[in-house]
Image: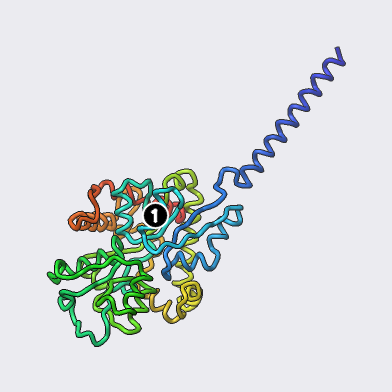
Amino acid sequence: MMKKKMQGLFVMLVGLLVFTACGDEASEGNESGADQPEVVNIGYLRVPNDEMVAKTEGYFDQYFADLGIETNFVVFDSGVEANQAFASGSVDFASMGNTNGIIALSRGLDVELIWLHEILGEIEGLAVREGSGIEQVADLQGMKIATTFASTSHYSLLQVLNDAGIADDVELIDMKTVDIVAAWERGDIDAAYTWQPSLGKLLDGGEMLISSEQVAEMGHKTANILLARKGFTEQYKDLTTDFIAALVEGGNLYREDSKTASEIVANPLEITPEEALMQMEGSVWLTPEEEISSEYLGTSEEAGDFSRVMKQTSDFLLEQGSISESPSQEAFDDFINPEYIEAYLAR
């Protein structure tokens, strides 16, 4: 009898040790990030903003690489390419102008708006040649104007042409930013509405007729935004908050030391630090607290004014035939999700 009891005790002890070992292995698996992606695919624009600072300084690596997660950055010339990538499921995050965010929503892409990179000002504008005799928008009647269709530049250009009453009296040409610069140098176009750093190349021999800052003062605000794939954000909420944290670090560096920030982004953008600083100062960078204020994204409980800006812009794009359907105000309220900014601020 004693022998059987000892055998039973031994079996129980072995079972307990196995259970404990398995528990330790499971715990170690969670600590090593078993429930996490192997790679995060990030689409970005070549503009001097918080994301470019964070990318160049390796802030994303502090949150992702240290967990064994690879960050794969893909550069897009415009939000058109970014939305194509979202449609194919090949990116998790992508930056674009807010007009392309509207197009993403109107097409039913499974994405959400989680951050405003910057409110556009003199970083975008309508350039004409020096000595051309063009002194106001109305002088562009009958001329060729290049822009990137479905972009914030296209939207702003349409607004100023409408206000000048010449929207039907100019020839608009759809071009990528690099092609705009080449067409300008060849003398194929009379004017162009585009963004930095391409805009800076046009201004070397030209002048700004009107900027997006002035267009915003006319009531047509535009911004560069960050969209995220819901399949990623809903599964990896903490990692999405980490992404926001990296962007905040990039923005903070600029706010604390704009000269250093401009030097950081100058090389990857192939511009001088002085040019980078000028471009960075040509837009409004928001703190996370400002992001979720009533003037911009608002909170999870109440949508901010930017949702209404998106709806107004959407209605205009519908009138122009750029989209086939303008989503409802409620749809835009749901499209904007500030919970990851709120989670960052709660850390």
Residue 329 visible to the viewer = no
Q: Is residue 150 left or right of residue 263?
A: left
Residue located at (20% from left, 66% from top):
159
Please, which residue is most extreme toward the right here? 3
Residue located at (29% from left, 55% from top):
304
Residue located at (27% from left, 82% from top):
129
Nearest the viewer among 13 and 33 is: 33
Residue 113 picture location, percent across and down: 37, 53
Residue 237 picture location, percent across and down: 48, 47
Nearest the viewer among 92 and 4 is: 92
Residue 35 visible to the viewer = yes
Please determine whether, in this image, residue 156 is positioned above or below residue 104. below
Residue 169: image quadrant is bottom left
Please determine whether, in this image, residue 72 is positioned above or below residue 181. above
Q: Residues within 10 Å of mark 1 (few under 14, many from 20)?
A: many
Residue 292: image quadrant is bottom left
Residue located at (46% from left, 55% from top):
344
Kind of residue indicated by mark 1: Leu
Specify the quadrant that holds the N terminus: top right
Residue 14 picture location, percent across and down: 78, 27
Look at mark 1 in the image and give the residue it sits on: 227
Residue 239 picture location, percent across and down: 51, 51
Q: Secondary structure at mark 1?
A: strand
Please, which residue is most extreme toward the bottom here? 131
Please, which residue is most extreme toward the top here? 1
Please determine whether, in this image, residue 324 is positioned above or below residue 225. above
Nearest the viewer among 170 and 122 is: 170
How was this image coloured? rainbow
